Image (spheres, helix red, strand yellow):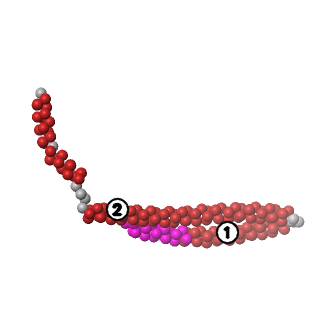
């Protein structure tokens, strides 16, 4: 039985001998210098591309951060303006009550009330005009900033491609 086992083992060994020899030769095979240089250059180029992509992603992030910061700043400015307008309206209301309280006749009270309504209407019209101009400016600047950011992103993408 041992002879049969040895014989079977030898047969398998002989059948796989070309593969075993090829594997032994593969382990000791020398890689040509041109191949090593090619791999080094390819790795160096890839490393540069990754560096470029990273630098460009930083620029894109900075552009987005600037846009968001500007938006938050503008939102805060709008909020302050609304608060200021509300405060002015309340002050105007109480000043109007003081004027009405000083009226000596019904005609004078009606005239004071008419003047207050007209004055308040003028203030509202001025605010509407100012708000419209401000909104137009924001939209124009926002569109310009968006266009610049899209251009930057496109430029960065082109450089890294």
Query: Which of pointers 1 and 2 indicates the residue nearer the eye?
Result: 2
Residue depicted at x 39% and y 65%: 48
Q: Quadrant of residue 46?
A: bottom left
- 153 left or right of 128? left
Q: How many marks?
A: 2
User: Where does residue 37 sit, x and y in percent of width and height?
Assistant: 29, 64
Does residue 69 appear anywhere in the picture?
yes
Give the camera-side residue of 21 and 42. Answer: 21
Does residue 100 appear anywhere in the picture?
no
Q: CA distance from mark 1 to mark 2?
A: 62 Å
- 144 left or right of 91? left
Residue depicted at x 86% and y 65%: 103
User: Where does residue 4 sit, x and y in percent of width and height?
Assistant: 11, 31
Write down the region rendered in magenta. Answer: 141-161
Q: Quick one: SS at disc 1?
A: helix
- Label 2 Cα neighbours within 10 Å, binned few <14 / some 14-19 / many ≥20: few
Residue tagged by mark 2?
Answer: 43
User: Where does residue 25 sit, x and y in percent of width and height?
Assistant: 20, 51
| Residues at marks 1 and 2 touching, judged by CB atoms closer than 8 Å | no
Residue tagged by mark 1?
Answer: 127
- 52 left or right of 69? left
Q: Earlier in the sequence, mark 1 or mark 2?
A: 2
User: Where does residue 47 sit, x and y in percent of width and height?
Assistant: 39, 62
Residue 148 is covered by the magenta coloring = yes
């Amino acid at each position: 039985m041992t002879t049969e086992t040895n014989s079977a083992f030898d047969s398998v060994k002989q059948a796989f001998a070309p593969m075993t020899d090829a594997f032994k030769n593969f382990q000791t095979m020398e890689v040509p210098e041109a191949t090593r240089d090619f791999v080094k250059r390819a790795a160096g180029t890839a490393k540069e591309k990754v560096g470029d992509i990273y630098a460009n992603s930083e620029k894109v992030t900075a552009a987005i951060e600037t846009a968001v910061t500007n938006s938050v700043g503008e939102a805060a400015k709008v909020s302050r303006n609304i608060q200021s307008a509300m405060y002015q309206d309340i002050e105007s209301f109480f000043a109007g009550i003081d004027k009405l309280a000083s009226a000596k006749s019904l005609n004078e009270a009606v005239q004071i009330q008419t003047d207050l309504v007209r004055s308040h209407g003028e203030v509202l019209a001025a605010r509407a005009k100012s708000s419209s101009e401000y909104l137009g400016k924001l939209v124009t600047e926002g569109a310009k900033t968006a266009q610049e950011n899209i251009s930057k992103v496109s430029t960065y993408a082109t450089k890294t491609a």
